[in-house]
Image (tube, rainbow, N blue to C red):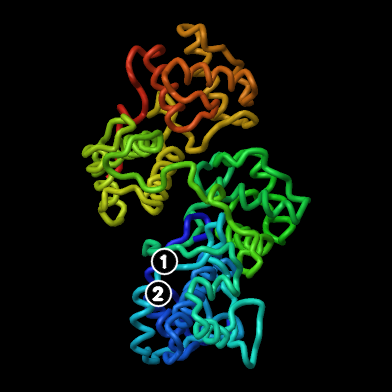
Amino acid sequence: MLSGTPFIPETITVHLGTPDSDAPNVTLDFASYIKNVASSEIFPTWPESALRANIYAIVSFALNRIYTEWYRSRGYDFDITATTQYDQKFINGREYFRNIGYLVDELFNDYVRRQGTVEPLFTAFCNGTTTTCAGLSQWGTVDLAEQGLTPFEILQYYYGDDIEIVKNAPVRTAMPSYPGIELALGSAGNDVRSLQIYLNRISGNYPAIPKIPQADGIFDAATESAVRTFQSVFGLEPDGIVGQATWNRIVYIYTSVKRIAELDSEGVRLEEVAPLFNEDLSIGMQSIEVSILQYYLAVIGAYYAAVTPVEITGYFGEQTERSLKSFQRVFGLPQTGVADRATRNDLYRAYSGIAETVRPEYTAVALYPGTVLKEGDSGESVRIIQEYLTFIHSTYINIPAVNNTGYFGPVTRQAVMEFQRTFGIDPSGYVGAITWDKIAEVYSDLRFGFDKRPYQNPGYTIE
């Protein structure tokens, strides 16, 4: 969950022992877990202000474990343990105190955080009699409540005046922060930006890891270099590709250097988790991300007869929803008509499979290679886009001609930006799916006299 804004998970998985023991796991809804812990940790006869303060602390502690993926980033298959040696007390199958249950129903989606940060505070606590700690004293809350302090004032007494309580956080199904697909040179999106932010912060503690100049969501050569160095430093295969093992290790080290799972956390700022790109795409939206979604659907629809074709307009209307639902049906996904992470991952996989396997004789104009091209890149895809731009130059002389060297240098970037300005695309200098598709369209019209892009006339379909 670390790469997004916190929410309340529908369920939590508890390990009924110490982390490395062979004890079983139990999964239950989050509110029931909080009722169990509160009934195990505190006494129902305490003043209500003390009960409320403790419940806030219990909720925030559990959410911090989930938000930081404290256990899952280290390969465990649970969110938290049942022992106070590591976490907070959970007794599987116990009954709840009625008044505590009522309070939890009211408070389970409220949590404590530091002002200016987004993560749930690691609200360390102890009983205050047999054990003491830097955080909240459970028995101490009773004394403070009897003195007339409110729940919030009790929390401020232990955690400082700079805390605040987030009220009514949304309840959602928890998803791992790992994107679900490998990230590599040319990948793009919010997950890449999160990766870049993590690595840049880690490099502050491990200077051998080079800084990434721009956390722009584009997996470029600088990002690949930082990934390779990270992998070398932490004993992973230095292939420059971020699979699940590398992602989990990055999340764990990032959490550690920022002390997010500590009371004196450095904190996660909103700008660190605010997405650059729309996450879920649905009907009524209009954006470049919708255009990219439509491009993938258009190509896939050309080769899979059961996927409804769609036009690339940038607007998510009923036609796009029908096309997306048909894709979800063919690929065994819930037919929601919403492009969530799982759907977009499968879209990319399906598209990449087509781009890698379609024989050249079927495509007079090349398909988008599936990776964003930018200055500093090299390879056959760069050479193709240079060839197309040079041909387009003969008609649009404002667009510079470039040598077909296969290296994306300043002249290629200038040509791409001028093409983008000419055809109403944001002049970023990057060649993503939409810029590639538009270059291919113009090239096809000029060279062949009509549109020979592969998804317009592929020549065969996949059943």
* Element carrying mark 2: helix
Query: Within the image, what quadrant is residue 205 found in?
Result: bottom right
Q: Is residue 20 visible?
A: no
Residue at image position (47%, 68%) is 111
Please determine whether, in this image, residue 152 is positioned above or below residue 141: above
Q: Mark 2 and mark 1: span between their CA atoms?
A: 8 Å
Measured from the top left, where is residue 157 in percent x and y? 59, 74
Q: Which residue is mark 2?
A: 30
Q: Are marks 2 and 1 in contact (CB under 8 Å)?
A: yes
Q: Which residue is mark 1?
A: 8
Horizontal relation, residue 426 to residue 206: left or right: left
Measured from the top left, where is residue 320 in percent x and y? 26, 39
Measured from the top left, where is residue 262 in percent x and y? 64, 69
In the image, 138 versus 209, the foreground residue is 138
Residue at image position (29%, 42%) is 304
Residue at image position (49%, 42%) is 276
Amino acid beneath label 2: Phe
Amino acid beneath label 1: Ile
* Element carrying mark 1: strand
Please determine whether, in this image, residue 386 is positioned above or below residue 189: above
Q: Is residue 113 visible?
A: yes
